[in-house]
Amino acid sequence: MLKVNNNFLKLAGSYLFTEIAHRVADYKAANPQAPVIKMGIGDVTLPLPKASILAMQKAISEMAHKDSFRGYGPEQGYDFLRNAIAEDYKMNGVQVEADEIFISDGAKSDTGNIGDILSKDCKVALTDPVYPVYVDTNVMAGRAGELQANGMWSNIVYMPCTKDNGFVPSLPKEQVDVIYLCFPNNPTGTTLTKSQLQVFVDYALKNNALILFDAAYECFITEKDVPHSIFELPGARQCAIEFRSYSKMAGFTGTRCGYTVIPKDVVAEEDGQKVSLNKLWLRRQCTKFNGTPYIVQRGAAALYTSEGRQQVRQMADYYLENARIIREALIKAGYEVFGGVNGPYVWAATPNGQSSWDFFDYLLKEKNIVTTPGVGFGPSGEGYIRLSALGSRENTIEAMSRF
Ligand code: MLT
């Protein structure tokens, strides 16, 4: 008899952003004239950088000729992109080798798939609130246990990030094997300083744990003491994997490209033998992934040229200015807000203690603004909404005038 992976049955019917999309679609169907502004899912709105477009056009032309056509590429990515990334790390004082870099179709897939190479028995710690992919994929893998009445999974260790601790998580209260950290943070838009992140690296080294560090929002860092890469910190090469993405950095949410760095120094022990996670991931990718399209990788590599770098900077600055506009408008309107300085998300407390979903519904129906309810990111997100600064300037200003 056919059986399914019944861990999937433990999950909510739909993924957070799918649920929001359904609610918005229902509202729009009933109110087709409503001038709805989307500040929910963090989707970008500026077109791709010119440097990427030109590189991709050239790559398409190569595909049109027999002698420059490319079929299957290396599953781990083309050398031209891996070398450019390694060089970029080096320019920033971080030692990462090209063969420690795995090109992919984005950080969502990689942070979701990385669990393939980890035991089902690993104890996982997550910040709360958190990017829902980390939770849901651990539920799918059977690591999360059961969903409890308080919205927490019985086998996951939660590290609350609240205004009381300045959104800086404390170390897990019990020993864990895997710690997911995303900084600059999705959803709160807040960051950790180098010394705050070092606490986690030291913990991981001491406890043989692995840090999965999602740096998808690195390009938005504006403050000095905020690490751009976990590998800036001593010891991190022995205990961390870093995920990066071109989605927010270069408008690749639809184009799809990112990468994962697994230092060769990260090893686990299995039956007294040292096992390289870099090798396991390569094995996984060669079996389950056929590489990011050549054309897309050319588009990504162009971001490391001087024109590309300049265009990426302009793009990040544009969204950071939106974030500033959102922050200031909300503060003026009396809201308590966080984030939006080193990241494209603003995290705002709901007024009068309203629940996240109630305030989400109010904003959708009365103000025609789509946000993301904080509780969708975890129990500690209750009483907050998240606003994305990745929209257009006009829509950002218009939405803020409605507050
Ligand atoms: C978000 O809104 O949290 C992100 O856009 C989701 C993602 O990057 O997958």
Image (cartoon, rainbow, N blue to C red):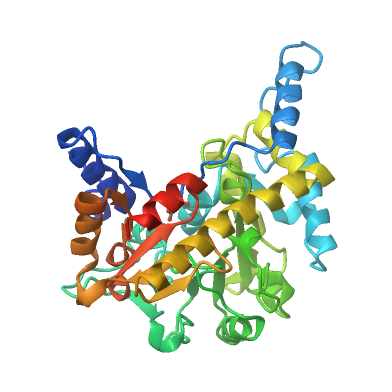
The quadrant of the image that shows the C terminus is bottom left
**Is residue 209 left or right of 157 when viewed as pictured?**
right
Compared across the picture, whether 292 is left or right of 360 comes to right
The part of the image, by quadrant, that contains residue 32 is top left
Q: Is residue 385 left or right of residue 256?
A: left
Residue 79 against residue 107 in the figure, above or below: above
Tell me where residue 111 appears, x and y as whole percent: 50, 56
Identify the residue at horizontal 64%, vertical 86% (top origin): 195
Above-or-below relation of 45 to 167: above
Q: Position of residue 25 (x, y in %)?
A: 24, 38
The residue lying toward the viewer, choosing from 337 and 21, is 337
Quadrant of the snapshot with the N terminus: top left
Q: Nearer the viewer, residue 118 or 12?
A: 12
Q: Residue at x 28, y 71 (%)?
A: 350
Residue plotted at (20% across, 69% down):
355
- Residue 41 visible: no
Left or right of 392 in this view: 315: right
Residue 182, visible in the rendered structure: yes
Q: Residue at x 57, y 82 (%)?
A: 200
The answer to which quarter of the image holds residue 35 is: top left
Where is residue 53 drawn, in percent x and y?
69, 30
Q: Is residue 355 above or below residue 163?
A: above
Q: How many marks?
A: 0
**Nearer to me, 194 or 83:** 194
- Measured as percent of width and height from the top left, residue 297 is found at 69, 36
